[in-house]
Amino acid sequence: MPTTFYVLEAAVDQCTAEFYVNDIPIVRLGPGIGRYYGGPVNSHLIDGVNELAIVINPGATPSLAVTGDAGERQRSATRESRAIGKLTRYPFGAVVGGPQGVDLIIADWKGPEEEAPVVFPRVAAGQADLGELYGPWEWQDAGKIMLDETTAGEIKPVLEKLRESLAAANPGPFLELGRTRMKESARAFGFSVAEKERLIRTNTRQESSHAGWGLQPLNEARFDLRLCAEDRMVEAVAKDWEAILRENPDAGGRSAYYTMMLSRIGGEWAIVR
């Protein structure tokens, strides 16, 4: 295991906000979806200057998060509204939020003192040079992507192939397409790729034995692909802010989601985060 963990700690009050590390969306918080978050982001950091950004009161769907909804950019913010994010370094075994954390980057936004219309979405950001961390990631050398009908047409069959194979309890294509993500996450978090793949195969086999298990059909009308990582990744996300690839709901109505961001590596689509 690594000796150091880099954790995104985020909180909101009386607003909705989406938090990004190096232009990669990590979590959205707000009424009905949670006010607090704390999770490691080692594999999202780059050598040198890193950025933590918050989009406050983002647009209605992921692709509109930063630009906002046409004609609906004027909203009111109360004086109690706040969104804060911190990138904090912890030694292995420390408790998130505990005294061993060292704040490296802070992005903080507060509502205006006076009750007045504020233009949203708004962005608050912070940067810091963290020096050498884990070396370069493959996505950093990937070409920039133009998200047009051609690109969307290339991604849909990739997702359908994954859906069909996973529905057949065969995680092989998913593991193969996600080899870059697995390899680089292992470098950042210090786990064994072989052991992780074994666990995924075992879990897929066990879950697929349950009655009603399967993957939901792809509904292209719900797709809301968006660019991130300075246009070097495409997030496979739907208009409801959840991953496009998802399992059937369980008895409690909950679904498991296959989150993924894709880049062109060597001319082929690959899951990189």
Image: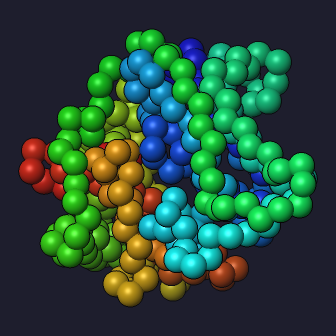
* Above or below: residue 1 compared with residue 84: above
Please, which residue is most extreme toward the left here? 267
Q: Residue at x 49, y 68 (%)?
A: 64
Task: Please indicate whether residue 194 sits to the left or right of residue 41 in the image.
Answer: left
Q: Residue at x 79, y 30 (%)?
A: 97
- The image's colour scheme reads rainbow
Give whichever of 88, 73 is nearer the camera: 73
* Above or below: residue 75 compared with residue 93: below
Q: Residue at x 68, y 70 (%)?
A: 74
Q: Residue at x 81, y 51 (%)?
A: 111
Task: Name which quarter of the figure residue 245 lies in.
Answer: bottom left
* Above or below: residue 91 compared with residue 221: above
x and y, in percent, of residue 150 in the image: 15, 72
Please, which residue is most extreme toward the top here? 131
Task: Please indicate whether residue 92 sits to the left or right of residue 63 in the image.
Answer: right
Q: How many discs appear?
A: 0
* Above or below: residue 262 compared with residue 198: below
x and y, in percent, of residue 101 in the image: 73, 20
Task: Please indicate whether residue 196 sits to the left or right of residue 41 in the image.
Answer: left
x and y, in percent, of residue 199 in the image: 44, 48
Task: Name which quarter of the figure residue 5 lies in.
Answer: top right
Task: Please indicate whether residue 76 sits to the left or right of residue 150 in the image.
Answer: right
Is residue 203 in view from this perspective?
A: yes
Is residue 7 in view from this perspective?
A: no
Give whichever of 25, 97 is nearer the camera: 25
Give whichever of 230, 138 is nearer the camera: 230
x and y, in percent, of residue 192 in the image: 39, 31
Task: Name which quarter of the figure residue 18 lies in.
Answer: bottom right
